[in-house]
Image (tube, helix red, strand yellow):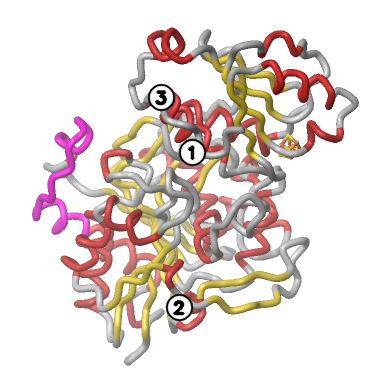
Amino acid sequence: MFNAKVSVVKSGHLPGNASFLAGKFVRNPEDIRQIKEVVKKAVEMAVGSPDAIIHEGQTVLIKPNIAFLAPPESFAVVDPRVIEAVVSYFKENSKAKEIWIGDNPSLGMHVGKARPALETAGLTAAAIAGGADRIIYFDEEELVDVEVPGATFFKKAQVFKPFLDADVVINLPKLKVHLAGTVTLGLKNWNGIVPNVHPSGQQQGVHRIDLGQKMADMYRIRKADLTLVDAIIGMEGQGPHAGTPVEMNLIIAGTDTVAVDAVSSSIMGFEPMEIPAVRCAATDGLGEIDLEKIEIVGEPLASVRRFFKRPNGDPIGMYKEITVFAQQTCPGCFVNVRGALDSFVNTGIDMGKMVKEHGEIVVLGGGVPDFDPEFARGKNLFITGDCWKYFPTRDKVEKAAALAKSVTYYPGCAPVYVFSQLNADLQKLSKQEEPALTR
Ligand code: SF4
């Protein structure tokens, strides 16, 4: 007896993948044609036909994962070819009145600006090419206060109005590993439905160690009518932003997002119970996690499974030019410092030259019981989070700040924006500009 159905469909050779994987995205009509065919098969196998989820005259919102201000070649955002194919498929094959596409990014150099993020990712152009009726930059839209009945802790939210207004919502995440969430798939994609302010907004302040429960709670606001995973080119390693691409050529589809995420994570070589959001949502009765109880149609999992490299969230000892002190530090600062350093190093910066010209870098995250303030003398000090102030060693951090060449504070708990801001500030330092929050 199955409780859910998930389809897994593989494309043939996509001619555009070679240049894309080599670092240059070029729209290839043959890719779009093939991906559209795969989307068609995946939808038909999962639900029969678009009419099963979209009725005549309805508005349909496609919610992609645009977590960052990043180009397609970053592979951190949904593939523009998938956007175009999905929009075009539903435009031509459903009785929808309008097809919308919209999102609000979580992270990036800009920290939450939808318009530049969608444009940089090539998704605005792709949505137009696919025939979208409306492109919605969520952070330019009204917010609606909602209660979340049954939630464990995320009991109230401010949600972008178009997400609630649409008659049908199609969830379109990308297949990626994630420093904080282990993977990011359909459940995690709902983070974009709430605003992104920092340091303590709904997206940022609650991006903590209980992120999985938050995502399960958020999923109660509104379930997806269909989840389609862009697994054409996934990301392994230091995801969700600085990992390496993995060619999979798959689309995964189903109406139960928990089941779709369980199947997708299994394809990536994870046990579904390892994924906090999937585990929490299943425990809360929001969907099926047990692969034995999910009818999987299309490709057998064993034939498409690839064991994705797992992300490493530890920022200590990565670079001799950047010393990180993370002692009594929870993942709220820990993984976000690592994420920032991964991004910074990916810029190809000559760290030796930077340090020679501008001085050494010290990052303090959380409480630091074993820290000699003298270590910061004459160096550039970056202090993340609020909790160091509540440790008995507060005076050591204050003394270090007095001895340092420059000090940059990142207030908040959890200061998730460190993920983008520390990277931005290190880049500024390398160009001899003042970091935003320097004393
Ligand atoms: S400020 Fe402290 S408690 Fe808060 S996220 Fe950072 S390390 Fe964790």
* Residue at the spot 49% in from the left edge and 59% down from the top edge: 295
Report the magenta residues as a range: 18-36
Magenta-drawn stretch, dominant element (helix, strand or loop)? helix
Q: Earlier in the sequence, mark 1 or mark 3?
A: 1
Residue 60: image quadrant is bottom left
Residue holding disc 3: 432
Q: In x, y percent, where is residue 6? A: 45, 59
In this view, 6 is above or below 368: below
- Give the residue drawn at x 43%, y 38%: 241
**Mark found first going from the N terminus, 1 or 2:** 2
Task: Give the crowd class for mark 1: few <14, some 14-19, many >=20 residues within 10 Å.
Answer: many
Please tell me which residue lies in front, 307 or 421: 421
Q: Quadrant of the N terminus?
A: bottom right
Q: Is mark 3 within 8 Å of ligand 1?
A: no
How far apart are labels 1 and 3 at the CA level? 34 Å
Mark in the foreground, 2 or 3: 3
- Residue 191 is drawn in which quadrant? bottom right
- Residue 24 in the magenta stretch? The answer is yes
Question: What residue is shown with label 2?
Answer: 162
Residue 177 circle label: 1
Identify the element where label 3 is drawn: loop
Q: Is residue 396 magenta?
A: no
Identify the amino acid type marked 3.
Answer: Gln
Q: Secondary structure at mark 2?
A: helix
Q: How far is the residue under mark 1 from the one under mark 2?
A: 28 Å
Q: Position of residue 8 (x, y in %)?
A: 37, 53
413 vs 379: above or below: below
Residue 414 percent across, percent down from the top left: 69, 44
Q: Nearer the viewer, residue 146 or 272?
A: 146
